[in-house]
Amino acid sequence: MSFLRDPKRLIATLIAGVAGLIVLIDFASAVPNLDQLARIIVDWAALLAVMALLVGLLSVTAGHLMRVLRRQPDWGYSLVLLAAMLVVIVSGTIVGLVPGGYTLFPSSLVEQPIRDLFRAFYQPLASSFLALLAFFSLSAALRALRRRTADALVIVIVALLALALVALPQVAALPVLGDSVQWISDYVALAGARGLLIGAALGAVVAGVRVLLGFDQPYLDR
Amino acid sequence: MTLPPETLLLLIVVLLVIILTLLHHARALAGKRPISRRLLPGLDIVGRALARGAETGRAIHISPGSGSVGTRSGTVETVAGLLAAERVATDAALNGAPLLASSGDAVAHLALRGTLRQAYQRAGLGQDYDPANVQMLAHQDPMAYASGVTTLYGRQKLEASQMIGSFGQEFLLAGEDGQQREVPQFGGATTTTALPFVYLTTEGTLIGEEIYAAEAYLARSPAPLARLLTQDALRTVIILAIVVLMILAAAGLQFSL
């Protein structure tokens, strides 16, 4: 059914379209009253994002609580997640441990308790995952070599060449090899990357205009 | 009020795109001239998975990525992923194939829930929609999101996994795990950090602007094909502009705004 005949969809489309146009025009030029209105809309969007985060938090909590209560497979991990969530929320908002004691009602998330938690737990885990990428890329490269498709072989060979040039300066100093790879990087690879960027930008512009005009409505929820 | 030249150019471009969008939408709805389209490799993976999923009862995983709606980078890719997810959800609802959706951001999570609920309702099967099948795995933490996807892969055998949207290097974590577990994967991204990993770990890849076209390919009605016409028209304009500017530059003529 056309959204012109459906009041709910029409109102949602008008709100999305008008708000989007106001922000777009404000981005394009500085019109005094429009500037203020655009800033209000952006502030409301930020507030909605915070509400979305709260809803997401409740959704995650409910889902994992159900897994624990029903003793579904891997319910232990859900318990760890819930406990960690509780510790971080309490440390960041009510009371948190600091060297020599504790602090009540930290004023921001960059205060000592949260910083210490992130330094002790989050940073090592994040670094570990990043380190895993090296092994995963090796595994993906070996499988690509086994598959022997032309495109995958090109990707792997170029990646190995780039790795050799970075890891071994002596290879980069070779007269023909170093210059050739530099030329490929400055012209061929850059041209490809720019083509990709232009194509993606075109697609993004069309997608954005279609959302503004109401042809695509990913924001609807009825 | 005088507008700077860049502002004027931007508004003219937006107006041109609006006019083209409306014209092509009308053409697609009229259906007088058939709209031809080239084959997008790998899209049939999703179709086959939907048919198999209805028989085997194994879920199809869909994800718009770890990006957010509202940030400068990642919004449009996430929207493209949401639209593709909606098409797959509509077909899954009609076929009776179970779905499992995941996202890496709270706003995208809500949008994904609404998109899937809308798809089931449009298919007339609103009662089959289960919000527990739409999971928020992380919030604005791509690596945590990817590790959440690997957990989903390990927890249950999946018929296929469609990951189209905003991805970075974290795609390798999820994609490689899916390959090792022999999950048929279909991915799409626009960033140079993600695309090599998508290509190496999936059976079908959408490169750059193709992720915006995926929704039109997956749709059952002809109206979304208007998007392809508009993108093709704009691409033609850009190519002509590049060629003309190249000739002008070669002739020594300067052109500036």
Image (cartoon, rainbow, N blue to C red):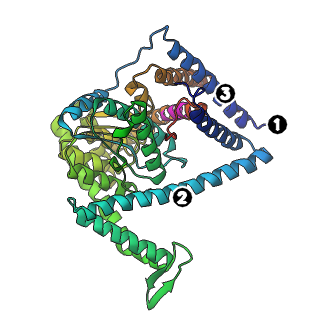
SS for tag 3? helix
- Residue type at tag 1: Thr
Cα–Cα span, label 1 and label 3: 18 Å
Q: Is residue A92 visible?
A: yes
Magenta-span inclusion, residue A201: yes
Q: How would you rate the neighbour count of disc 1 (Cα within 10 Å): few for under 14, some for 14-19, many for 20 or more?
A: few
Q: Position of residue B133 (x, y in %)?
A: 33, 47
Write down the residue under mark 1: B2
Q: Which residue is mark 3?
A: B15
The chain under label 2 reads A
Using the image as rendered, state which of residue B40 and residue B30 is in the foreground. Answer: B30
Picture residue at 46% right of the left edge, 21% below the top: B225
Residue B247 in view: no
Q: Amino acid at mark 3?
A: Leu
Label placed on residue B59: none
Check if mark 1's residue and mark 3's residue have beta carbons within 8 Å.
no
Q: CA distance from mark 1 to mark 2?
A: 38 Å
Q: Amino acid at mark 2?
A: Val
Query: Which range is magenta?
Result: A200-207
Q: Secondary structure at mark 2?
A: helix
Q: Nearer the viewer, mark 2 or mark 3?
A: 2
- Residue under numbered circle 2: A50
Question: Which of the two discs, 1 and 3, labels the residue nearer the N terminus?
Answer: 1
Query: Would you call the spot at circle 2 few (<14 residues within 10 Å), some (14-19), or many (20 or more)?
Result: some
Question: What percent of the width, then of the height, locates residue B4?
Answer: 76, 38
